[in-house]
Image (cartoon, grey):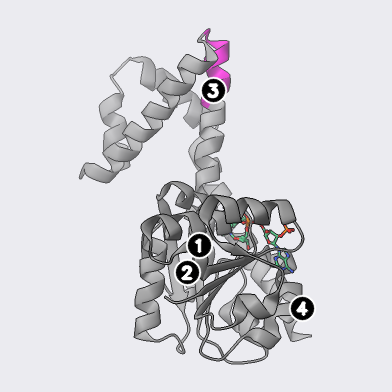
Amino acid sequence: MKKLAVVGAGSMAEALISGIVESRLITGDNIWVTNKGNEEKLQFMQKTYGVQATYNLEKIFKGAEAVILAIKPKDAADAITLIKPYLKTDMLIISVLAGVSIESIELLAERKLPVVRAMPNTSAAVGKSASALSVNERVTTKQMELVKEMFETVGMAAFVEEKQLDAVTGLSGSGPAYIYYLAEAMEKSAEEIGLEKEMAKEFIIQTLIGAAEMLAKSAKEPQQLRKEVTSPGGTTEAGVKVLEENGVQKAFIECIKQATAQSQRLGHSFSSTVKI
Ligand SMILES: NC(=O)C1=CN([C@@H]2O[C@H](COP(=O)(O)OP(=O)(O)OC[C@H]3O[C@@H](n4cnc5c(N)ncnc54)[C@H](OP(=O)(O)O)[C@@H]3O)[C@@H](O)[C@H]2O)C=CC1
Ligand SMILES: O=C(O)[C@@H]1CCC=N1
């Protein structure tokens, strides 16, 4: 790709840019980044990834083949209204906004555009994102290949139907936070059972990596893998009993349902403002 424009320079934009630059899919000098006003962050991006950072929208969009929208849903209406004059009908729009539909983006831009709606996660920063991609009918096969290649620089990527994106958001978009929540609980417990913090941290991380790798490499279901850890009358059984008594699995299921519902709510409230 000759030139990529990135609107927003927060955690998601940075994770994507770091992967793209590291893989050399697009060189830093062909990536143009802007944000709302945090100049320090723009300078950091320029220094760290060799990208072009500016508030001059003319410069950012001139000749850009694709635009990544990496702003929060609450800022999307203002940002898209601001960049609207620079969007060309053949410019590929790649939105990572949770909940915001392809239709809403086109309505705000007031033109038909090739739009990819993507849902990555922050593990993109270490090349391990799970990214779901959804396209409208204006996205060409070549653009689909390009965008898949782009998201594969930061992990795995697969196309899904747009209606599945809220569920993907609740499951894997927010997913890293659920794992960090578990890690927090493990760290807190380590202190209470008399383990030194730093040492415990190493054991926790390796346990999470090991379990994830077992899930990835073994043909066995998670329940079977859990059974294999659980000796009758042993320690795991005693521990998992408490999780069951406290409805932890149920709570995780409810958590993912609520995150999915919130993605739907964000989308609905956004599209109702766009249509007014
Ligand atoms: N974080 C995550 O785990 C994931 C996030 N997403 C989606 O990614 C998007 C971005 O999230 P995240 O990176 O976490 O958010 P951040 O808050 O880290 O970054 C938001 C960025 O948007 C910029 N911005 C706000 N308004 C404008 C504007 N008018 N013009 C240009 N830039 C603007 C901000 O600039 P400034 O700093 O100057 O205010 C900032 O750089 C969200 O829509 C979210 O739904 C998707 C998957 C996972
Ligand atoms: O919490 C959020 O809304 C964003 C979308 C998925 C992960 N973070």
Name the disc covering residue 273, or none. Answer: 4
Tell me the crowding category of disc 4: few under 14, some 14 to 19, or many 20 or more residues within 10 angstroms, Cα based.
few
Tell me the crowding category of disc 2: few under 14, some 14 to 19, or many 20 or more residues within 10 angstroms, Cα based.
few
- Measure the alpha-carbon separation of dots 3 and 1: 29 Å
Amino acid identity at mark 1: Ala
Which residue position is annotated with label 1? 167
Amino acid identity at mark 4: Thr
Tag 2–tag 1 contact (CB < 8 Å): yes
In which quadrant of the rendered image does the C terminus lie?
Answer: bottom right
Q: Quadrant of ligand 1?
A: bottom right
**Disc 4, SS:** helix
Numbered range of the magenta stretch: 186-194
Name the disc covering residue 187, or none. Answer: 3
Name the disc covering residue 143, or none. Answer: none
Looking at the rendered image, the disc whose residue lies closer to the viewer, 4 or 2, is 4
Looking at the rendered image, the disc whose residue lies closer to the viewer, 3 or 1, is 3
Name the disc covering residue 164, or none. Answer: 2
In depth, the one of 133 and 271 nearer the eye is 133
Q: Is residue 15 above or below residue 116?
A: above
The number of numbered badges drawn on the structure is 4
**Disc 3, SS:** helix
**Which one is earlier in the sequence, the residue at label 4 or at label 2?**
2
Image coords of residue 87 (percent x, y): 62, 85
